[in-house]
Image (spheres, rainbow, N blue to C red):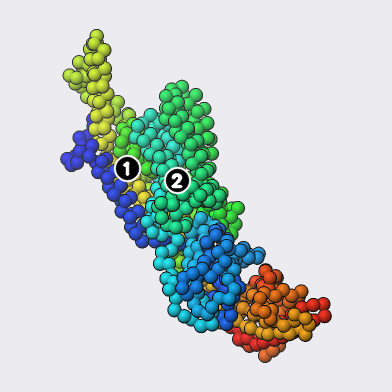
Amino acid sequence: MSATAPHAGPSPIRRPLAAAALLTALVSLVFGLLLAGAGPASAHAALTGSDPADGAVVDTAPKEVTLSFSEAIAVGDDSIRVLDPSGKRADTDTEPKDLSEGSTVRYGVALHSGLPDGTYTVAWQAISADSHPISGAFTFSIGAPSDTTVALPSQEAGGGPVGVVYDIARYAAYGGFVLLVGGSAFVLACWRGGATALPMQRLVVRGWLTLTAATLVMLLLRNPYTGSGKFADAFDLAGLQSVLDTKPGAALVSRLLLLGAAALFIAVLFGTYARREDEREKKDLTFGLAVGGGVVATGIAATWAMSEHASTGIQANIAMPVDVLHLLAVAAWLGGLASLLVALYRTPDIGSAAVRRFSAVAFGSVVVLAATGIYQSWRQVGSWSALTGTRYGQLLILKVALIAVLLAVAWFSRRWTGRLTDSAAASEEASEEEPASDSDSVSADPDPDPERAAQLARQRAALTATKKKRIRDADPQRSGLRRSVLAEAAVAVVLLAVTTMLTSTEPGRTEEEAAGGTPSASAPAAGGPVNLKMPFDTGGQNGKGTVRIDIEPGRTGSNDLHVWIDGSDGKPMDVPELKLALTLESKDIGPLPVVPDRLAEGHWSASAVQIPMAGDWKIDVTVRTSDIDQVTIDKNAKIG
């Protein structure tokens, strides 16, 4: 078969460079746009309530401030700070107390006694269970609102320059994982000859280097990313030690250790394996590398699953292995696609058999992605309203659309694959038909000079490579396949960026729950926090005091109830027994008993107190100060 001369246009050497430059520019543009519009990462956990509530005005100074969250969080010494109108600390400056009960996540800080009237600012910062930092601030007033010199923080946790660099490292880590795992899988499963191809070696090694560097950057920046937001704190040894004690820190260290094993795998793949010529030995080594590489790749994927969205929320035990499968399927598909693109543009030896094997691998990866993606979508979204009305749901729709486009382009690639002619066979036919050139004839003559012989050998190799490249570039089927795979790679870059954004966005299910539940749930009646103050006298010694009651959010449905008892001297007072009952006399509902739990001296609490109907509720409080001294007092409160 005579080779058809390539048509006029850009030279074959420039076309691969132009394609690579185009793909690089697209990567930079996509990541630039995403980083410009992403802002600080939204988190899985959200503040669902506080006591006192945001904007509340209370008659007397509370003993503590409590915050409730939708999911588990990690807190430190300064996670909750209460500032008076002049900006001074009004809390006792200690680590927040864990007041969580059952599924309710609540933390509190004690306040100094004798706080003056005015507006107080509560600033909080924590780390969500899925590794993302969260922060916020609100105010409440004692007696009456006042001017305050405290400015609410304008920058959320995880923002600023440190947040931008950390996000870039997160994107790079996913990209490096895809190239490392997908490139290695492509060599072992689709094109064993690629182990000796320098472009394939560079692709996999660059993937390893990118993932390793990104992981190191994330580990160093983890402390300022979740705390001060200053680059200087990246080398704070105390802060680094605190990071290592967290779940995300342990995941990053584990990833670095696994990358050490991955370096050994790469050395064997492109060293011993590439030099092995005996087919039986190579087959056995292929099996060993596949098993060992699969274990390492699974471990690296698990470092994401164990520290991000999959590790929290419903069915975490199922979600984490599903997330690992999803990541491996993404790497096999997109990383293999990048490897195929490099092989088509940079090497003349890849044949149709390797392309067809990758087509089968890609199909299997798509099946796994579909199955795991459906489960993840249900778990993280949960409703149609969350799919269309939240940022997570909208990104998920975009991801599905990109996958559909990618599959459509892949269909054209499969058509070109069916027409592809192996370059090796084409080269042999061309060699048979083309007459030997003068240089070939001269090089065939024996030359006693070893230096001259080596020079001639290099010339023959260069001529052979040029001939193969000319034949490859002239093959219309191969050119069509290269254009189709380049289009796939371009879509895959955008798809990978959107996937990375999903991992840092609050799932639609929890966003709706934090906002008050899904529309399918019955909407609670409007209301506001209830604050009551009731004096009592049991008649015995030290029997006088005051009961303070807070009910939040003060509407139908589930409420949190706090009770404080102050003695006649204004200090917290413990009593042997405290009981409450709620009665809606206009509807003959109740009395509904409430037995609060003691949290601290003079402080009791009850969570999930159900108020079935809005109305004017009578709240009866029974206080016993001794074996024989007891009194029941009551007060009406509008709830709902």
The crowding category of the residue bearing disc 2, from other C-alpha atoms within 10 Å (few below 14, some 14 to 19, many at least 20), is many
Q: In the image shown, does 255 or 345 lie closer to the viewer? A: 255
Task: Tell me: residue 538, above or below residue 79.
Answer: below
Task: Tell me: residue 213, above or below residue 460.
Answer: below
Rendered location of residue 452, percent (x, y): 23, 15
The amino acid at mark 2 is Thr
The amino acid at mark 1 is Leu
Rendered location of residue 356, percent (x, y): 41, 39
Q: Specify the label residue 489 is tagged with.
A: none
Give the CA separation, mark 2 to mark 1. Answer: 35 Å
Pointer 1: what residue?
A: 481
Q: Residue furthest bottom?
A: 586
In the visual, does 575 lie left or right of 549? Answer: right
Q: In the rendered view of the protein, which quadrant contains the C terminus? A: bottom right
Report if the CB atoms under discs 2 and 1 are less than 8 Å apart. no
| Marks 2 and 1, the one that precedes in the sequence | 2
SS for dot 2: helix
Pointer 2: what residue?
A: 215
Task: Tell me: residue 335, above or below residue 155.
Answer: above
Q: In the image shown, does 511 or 76 lie closer to the viewer? A: 76
